[in-house]
Amino acid sequence: MNWSDYEAIWKRQELPVGAGADLAALRETFETKRRKLAATLFVRDILEASAGLFVSGVFAYAGWHLPKVAWPIAIAVALILGVTGFFIRERIRAHRSRLGADAPLLAKLEADIAELRHQRRLLLSVAVWYIAPLALAVVIFGITVGMNLPPWAVGRDPLFQVCMWTFNFCLYWFVWVINRRAVRKQIDPRLEELEKLHQTLRSLP
């Protein structure tokens, strides 16, 4: 599972200007960008949940066929399923809070602001609820598989181990960086735009 897919979808959209955006343009493009946001989050949740189910299945299959100690892999599978369940819960939450096409513009605007604030919190705390459990699952799986390998296997070689764990560290660091960048480049400026439009609409007679 990789949130780079999520940022790639964001990058296909025009970067938000922020508080300096033109109000008329914001109002004109609001509905289109609102649908794009919903589609982006839908794709992310489906991809992440599907990947989680697949990886947990692979881990469980491997653990079942290990010749010696394998029970720790059950913990790894539970961690991955926990993250998977989080994305399923996000989809259910988004479905329940979805507004109809005939909802007032102000209500849609407030819903988008609330959604972006929610996504901002998720991305800034990704190390806690996403990276940490997945990294721990990989560590548990790697150590357990290593315990089952014969001494001469490549997987027991110290150089191989260093390369593998270095790669994993760099991968999770990259995920952390791109999520913070997405907040800085996409979410925060878009929030400024929507809050500016919201304040203007609220001030109208």
Image (tube, rainbow, N blue to C red):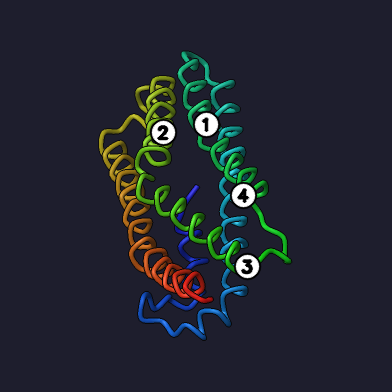
Question: Which residue lies most toward the front here?
Answer: 205
Q: Which residue is mark 2?
A: 133
Q: Which residue is mark 3?
A: 35
The residues bearing labels 1 and 2 have C-alpha atoms spaced at a distance of 8 Å
The residues bearing labels 1 and 4 have C-alpha atoms spaced at a distance of 19 Å
Specify the amino acid type for callout 2.
Pro
The circle drawn on residue 20 is none
Residue shown at 57%/74% (left/top)? Answer: 30
Specify the amino acid type for callout 4.
Ala
The circle drawn on residue 82 is 1
Comparing labels 2 and 4, the label whose residue is closer to the camera: 4
Helix, strand or loop at mark 4: helix
Query: Is residue 136 shown above or below 89?
Result: above
The residues bearing labels 3 and 4 have C-alpha atoms spaced at a distance of 13 Å
User: Is mark 1 in CB contact (under 8 Å) with mark 3?
Assistant: no
The residues bearing labels 1 and 3 have C-alpha atoms spaced at a distance of 28 Å
Residue 100: x and y, percent?
Answer: 72, 60
Helix, strand or loop at mark 1: helix
Q: Earlier in the sequence, mark 3 or mark 2?
A: 3
Crowd rating for badge 1 (residues with CA inside 10 Å; few <14, some 14–19, many 20+): some
User: Is mark 3 in CB contact (under 8 Å) with mark 4?
Assistant: no
Q: Earlier in the sequence, mark 1 or mark 3?
A: 3
Comparing labels 1 and 3, the label whose residue is closer to the camera: 3
User: Is mark 1 in CB contact (under 8 Å) with mark 2?
Assistant: yes
The residues bearing labels 2 and 4 have C-alpha atoms spaced at a distance of 23 Å
User: Is mark 3 in CB contact (under 8 Å) with mark 2?
Assistant: no
Comparing labels 3 and 2, the label whose residue is closer to the camera: 3
Residue shown at 54%/23% (left/top)? Answer: 63
